[in-house]
Structures are given as C-alpha cells and as structure tokens.
Image: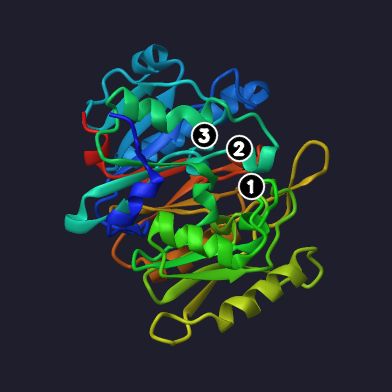
C-alpha cells in the first residue's frame, strides 16, 4: 500500500507526537557504510553506532537498523533476539535518519499516522536521492504497516521541529524560512503548512542561536527542546569570550518571552555549551548537549569526553526526567560529521514496523 496524499490529511484529527510519548518504544538507526561520508573513518564511527545500539538494547529500547548491507549486519548481530533488533535492507546516502525518517503523529484512537516529507540534503547541500526514498520504499514493501501521508511536495527535516504533542511546534526561522527548502517567504505560509501537515495549533519561532559548523541552518534539536508542555531545555553559553555567547544570549531572551498555551512562562533549563570541538582543519563543530533522545525507558545524552560538562548536562536532565535514567553515549565520532545522537536516531512505535 502506497502513502496517502497529503491533501487527504484534512480528514485526520492528528498531532505530531511528543518525543516522550510512551508509545515510542523503538528507535531507528541508519547504519554507516563505505558509500557514506563516513568512509574515511568508518571503523571509528561504527564503534560509536555499536555503543548506541548497546545502550538502547540494555535499556529495553527495540532498535530498527536500516542498511544496504543487511546480511552482513545480521551476521554481525547474530544472537540478538529479533524482538529486540530488526535489520532492514534499504539503500541510503547517509546516516542522519532524524531528518529523513518518518515523523509520527497520533490520530483518533491513538493510531500511529506516519508522514513522509521531502528531504533535499539540508537545502541542496548534499546528495539525498536514496535517503529521500527510504520511507516510501519501506511502506511499499509492507515493512511499515501504519498509514503514511505523502508529504513529498514539502521539504521538512525531523530535526527542525519540536512538538509537545498538544499542538505546539517549536522551530527556527533560519531553517524553515530557508529559500533552498520550500522558498516560503513568510512565517504565515510555513505555519499554514505545519498546521495542515502536522496538526499544529500554534508555532513558536526562534530567530537566534546559530552554532558554528552547523550545516542544517539551525535545526532546533541542537538549540532548544520541549520537555513536557511547560518546560524548555536549551543550550546556554556563560563564557563571554566564546564566539557563541551573543547569539545564544539572544536566543535565551527569545525563549524567556515564549508562553505556554495557558499563557504562562515556560520553565527554562539551560544546558552547558560543550567546550569547543574542532575538526582536523580547525573548523569548530556544532557540539551540543541539546541533541539528546527521549525514550520511555531512558534519556540518551551525547557526551564529548568533557567530564565536568558531561556530568553537568546529565545532572540537569536528571532533574527534568526524574522517572528514567540519563544514559551517556560518547558522540565524539558523530560530531566529526557535524551531527550527534538525536540527529542519528528516529523514534517510532514498534507497531508501525512489526516483526
């Protein structure tokens, strides 16, 4: 069965789900391979993915692995029960499944409703032909069994939107108003699309917060995250000598002016900005603790071998997510390609991709 056309979404009463929804009991990973940009450091990044996989499985999170080398991975993972790990063969350009994987909403009766948006390599910066077909391929072969809306006429990356599951979407102007996405010149035009396609009732915008080395045009999942309907966890810079200080201070001021649907200020939790991380050419990389992943069993936190700040970030998240552990995952390999843990994952209900 092919995806339904997005025009049919008007008959669905749905809303983009919050990441902390308890039905998100599975996580998708897109495994690195020699035809990705990881080729020059494939062994190193593979070890990072294995560490992520171990962390998910140890905390009861079913993991779905996408790869063009499925048989090789099934051999590598032999012994892990199928109900804990599923490997699916599909061609990919890259591993950042957050931005091309299916976005999940819940409609009437809490049935999962998946959305397939166009992915164009973060504004035509990178090849994306295979990644853009992943969802439709999984749907057409029956791997994804939940209804899927065809939104391929609209460019949207999963890392560019945050949802509280009640109709509030948090995003950034730099990304969603980028002319190389949809060439929509006004916030009103974008908001209309988010209301139609993701069930948004209101959209909160951030104009500031750009991180050096970020080639996504300021994805919100590197800057500010919704946690419950009344809390925002954001990236904060307290070092006035850091080149990010002014931009992140302006972002903090913007966030402080945001209000909940009830009109109350959000509770604000500032995560430390990691010490500067550079690539071999001396370019600063967009390391951030805001790129964490929430699951029903645990919160998975990217770390960067900075013991004091890694611990500070974990402690702050533990104060917010008091009902689940915060599990650190070393993401120094991931940041070398300008992404981190949340970028490399996509949450999904197991019922959408059954065994």
Callout 3: few (<14), some (14-19), or many (20+) C-alpha neighbours within 10 Å?
Answer: some
- Give the quarter of the image for residue 320: bottom left
- Give the quarter of the image for residue 185: bottom right
- Which residue in the protein does label 2 denote? 120
- Residue 84 in view here: yes
| The N terminus: image quadrant | top left
Specify the farthest residue to the left.
109
Vertical relation: 214 (above or below) 235: above
Vertical relation: 209 (above or below) 2: below
Residue 258 is situated, as x and y percent measured from the top left of the image, at 53, 80
- Which residue in the protein does label 3 denote? 48
Is label 3 or label 2 in front?
Answer: 2
Residue at image x 82%, y 69%?
241
Q: CA distance from mark 3 to mark 1?
A: 30 Å
Is label 3 or label 1 in front?
Answer: 1
Vertical relation: 12 (above or below) 124: below
Residue 218 is situated, as x and y percent measured from the top left of the image, at 65, 56
Is the Cβ of the residue at disc 3 closer than 8 Å to that at disc 1? Answer: no
């Amino acid at each position: 069965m092919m995806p339904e056309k997005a025009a049919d979404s008007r008959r669905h009463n749905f809303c983009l789900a919050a990441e902390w929804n308890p039905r998100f009991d599975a996580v998708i990973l897109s495994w690195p391979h020699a035809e990705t940009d990881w080729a020059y450091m494939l062994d190193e990044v593979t070890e990072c993915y294995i560490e992520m996989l171990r962390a998910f499985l140890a905390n009861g999170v079913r993991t779905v692995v996408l790869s063009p080398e499925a048989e090789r991975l099934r051999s590598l993972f032999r012994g892990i029960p199928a109900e804990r790990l599923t490997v699916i063969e599909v061609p990919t350009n890259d591993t950042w499944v957050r931005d091309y994987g299916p976005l999940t909403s819940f409609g009437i009766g809490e049935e999962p409703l998946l959305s397939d948006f166009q992915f164009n390599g973060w504004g035509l910066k990178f090849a994306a032909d295979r990644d853009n077909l992943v969802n439709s391929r999984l749907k057409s072969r029956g791997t994804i069994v939940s209804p899927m809306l065809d939104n391929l006429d609209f460019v949207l990356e999963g890392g560019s939107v945050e949802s509280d599951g009640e109709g509030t979407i948090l995003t950034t102007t730099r990304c969603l108003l980028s002319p190389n996405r949809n060439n929509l010149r006004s916030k009103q035009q974008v908001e209309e699309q988010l209301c139609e396609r993701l069930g948004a009732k209101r959209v909160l915008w951030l104009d500031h917060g750009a991180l050096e080395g970020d080639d996504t045009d300021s994805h919100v999942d590197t800057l500010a995250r919704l946690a419950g309907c009344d809390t925002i966890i954001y990236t904060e810079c307290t070092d006035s000598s850091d080149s990010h200080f002014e931009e992140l201070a302006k972002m903090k001021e913007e966030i402080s002016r945001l209000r909940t649907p009830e009109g109350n200020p959000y509770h604000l939790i500032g995560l430390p900005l990691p010490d500067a991380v550079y690539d071999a050419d001396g370019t600063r990389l967009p390391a951030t603790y805001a790129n964490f992943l929430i699951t029903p069993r645990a919160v998975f936190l990217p770390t960067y071998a900075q013991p004091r700040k890694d611990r500070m970030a974990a402690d702050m998240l533990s104060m917010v997510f008091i009902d689940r552990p915060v599990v650190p995952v070393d993401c120094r390999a991931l940041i070398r390609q300008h992404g981190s843990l949340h970028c490399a994952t996509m949450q999904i209900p197991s019922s959408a991709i059954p065994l």
